[in-house]
Image (spheres, rainbow, N blue to C red):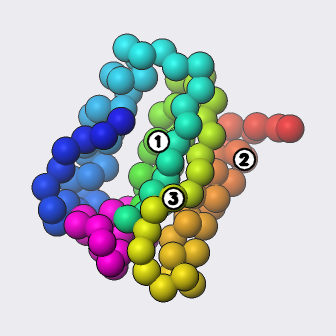
Amino acid sequence: MDIGLPKGTSDKEFLRAVSTSLPSILRSFRPDLVLYDAGVDPHKDDLLGHFELTDEGLYRREMLVMDTCLAMGIPVAGVVGGGYDDVARLGARHSILHAAANELWSDYRLSR
């Protein structure tokens, strides 16, 4: 899914676009699995990105995407990607996906 959004898009605008588009796309496409590339280049401090997402915005995005898939009974596999910054800051942003997945793992009582 690729949604055209203007430079400077904030957490609120970004999340609204995803929450508006994702469920209908999933309903119409009906995938067996979603492969989610959780790129962090939309972060406000990214050297090449043009959006203004915060760490909280990235976390809410990860929760939104994975929760929407799981609530519809669609397995989701998330991978980290993108991002151009100091490696420590980039690693912290990438770990947001894992924190969100861990929370949903517990919420949905997923097991091995």
Q: Mark 3 or mark 2, which has the lower sequence index? A: 3
Counting other residues with Cα less than 10 Å from the Cα at mark 1, is it few (<14), some (14-19), or many (20 or more)? many
- Which stretch did the figure color magenta? 42-57
Q: Nearer the viewer, residue 110 or 48?
A: 48
Counting other residues with Cα less than 10 Å from the Cα at mark 2, is it few (<14), some (14-19), or many (20 or more)? few
Q: Give the side of residue 92 with respect to residue 23, left or right.
A: right
The magenta stretch spans residue 72: no
What's the residue type where badge 3 is placed?
A: Gly
Q: Main secondary structure of the magenta part?
A: loop
Q: CA distance from mark 3 to mark 2?
A: 24 Å
Q: Nearer the viewer, mark 1 or mark 3?
A: 3
Q: Which mark is residue 81?
A: 3
What's the residue type where badge 2 is placed?
A: Ser
Tag 1's secondary structure?
helix
Residue annotated with mark 2: 106
Q: Which mark is residue 65?
A: 1
Q: Which mark is residue 2?
A: none
Q: Position of residue 48 (x, y in %)?
A: 30, 72
Q: Quadrant of residue 76?
A: top right
Q: Give the side of residue 71 with respect to residue 23, left or right.
A: right
The magenta stretch spans residue 47: yes
